[in-house]
Image (cartoon, grey):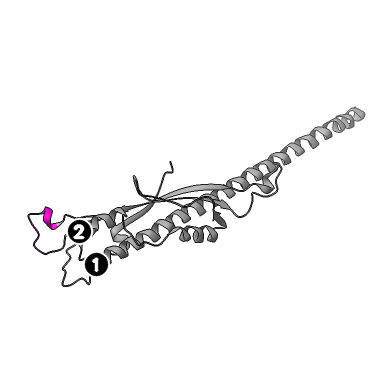
Amino acid sequence: MITRKYGDAGQAFPIYITVVAGLLFLAFAYLAVGQAAATRNGAQTAADAAALAAAQDRRDQLAGKWLENVLKPGLWKDIFRGEVEGLDPSCWRAQQLANENDAHVVGDCIPHWYPELGYTVEVETNDPVGDSIVPGTEATYAKATAKAVITPRCTFQLPDEDNGDNGDLPQLNCRDNKNWDLDPEHLSDLPGAEDLFDVHLADTD
């Protein structure tokens, strides 16, 4: 009986080793999956930040153009549609924010005007997934794409569409019940860029 007891123990030891090896393999596999997921999440965060940065820079420039032309309401519609000449490129902000998130812009930082004004940006992580049990991950980089759009927050009616032009500027009717009665003689209280335009992420096509 004693001999059989030790014999059973000897037979169980290889099974124990196999089970432990299997558990270790699963642990490393889960670690590899976690590494890949973390890298993908980092890429998406960088892409979101890059697209938003480019769109916000364009929003700020459009708001600046509106302020320059506040006494020319005939130009407002084009400004709110983003159809303005003389604006500086905004994609440098996308690259800047991608760099701050350990990534870089790949391909084009694409501005678009229809159906929505905004930017689509693709980024790639600077660092690979890293060594793991999955072959090739040490040279695999994550990519992600994000789209940010710029939408007007205000509406207005030009004087000539409202029973004639009486010389006053149109009232700006903005979201969150923010309205501006603009007096050409007293233009001290004017909306800011965040009042005129909204910037948010949108689904990529």
- Tell me residue 16's x, y (percent): 79, 35
Q: Is the residue marked by circle 1 packed among few (<14), some (14-19), or many (20+) residues within 10 Å? A: some
Secondary structure of the residue carrying tag 1 is loop
Secondary structure of the residue carrying tag 2 is helix
| Residue drawn 73% across the image and 41% down it | 24
Please name the amino acid that badge 2 sits on: Gly
Magenta residues span: 159-168
Label 2 belongs to which residue? Answer: 74
Image quarter in which the C terminus is found = top left
Q: Nearer the viewer, residue 107 or 188?
A: 107
Image quarter in which the N terminus is found = top right
Q: Residue furthest right?
A: 3
Which of the 4 quarters of the picture holds residue 52? bottom left
Residue 175 in sight here: no
Q: Earlier in the sequence, mark 2 or mark 1?
A: 2
Label 2 vs label 1, nearer the camera: 2
Please name the amino acid that badge 1 sits on: Leu
Q: CA distance from mark 2 to mark 1?
A: 18 Å
| Residue drawn 16% across the image and 69% down it | 184
| Total numbered labels placed on residues in the image | 2
Magenta segment main secondary structure: loop
